[in-house]
Image: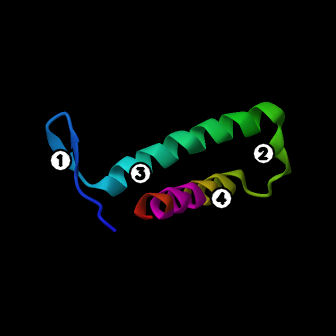
Amino acid sequence: MTLSEVNLFGVYVAPISVMMVAAWLATITLRRIADRFGFLRYVWHPALFVSAVYLILLSSIVLLSVR
């Protein structure tokens, strides 16, 4: 497990921040797809569902990057 800082335009940032942005962008994409097909109408609490999807994506990215 070797996670090191990421050089982003001369600024060193923690790798979790890059992973959080990647998960956020994937969540936005999945939410737009779900809105387009009307999937969020069948979800009891859409905001809670979207936050759960974000956490699942973020944890998956972290687990895949550590291996």
Other-residue count near label 1 (Cα within 10 Å), few / some / many at <14 / 14–19 / ≥20: few
Q: Is residue 23 left or right of residue 1?
A: right
Q: Which residue is mark 1?
A: 12
Q: Which label's residue is closer to the chain start, 2 or 3?
A: 3
Q: Which residue is mark 3?
A: 19
* Mark 2 residue type: Leu
Residue 66, image x, y percentages: 41, 64
Q: Magenta stretch containing residue 13, yes or no?
A: no
* Mark 4 residue type: Leu
Q: Which label's residue is closer to the chain start, 1 or 4?
A: 1
Give the Cα distance between marks 2 and 3.
25 Å
Residue 48 or residue 5, whichever sits in front = 5
Q: Which label's residue is closer to the chain start, 4 or 3?
A: 3
* Mark 1 residue type: Tyr
Q: Which residue is mark 4?
A: 48
Which quadrant would residue 16 be assigned to in this image? Answer: bottom left
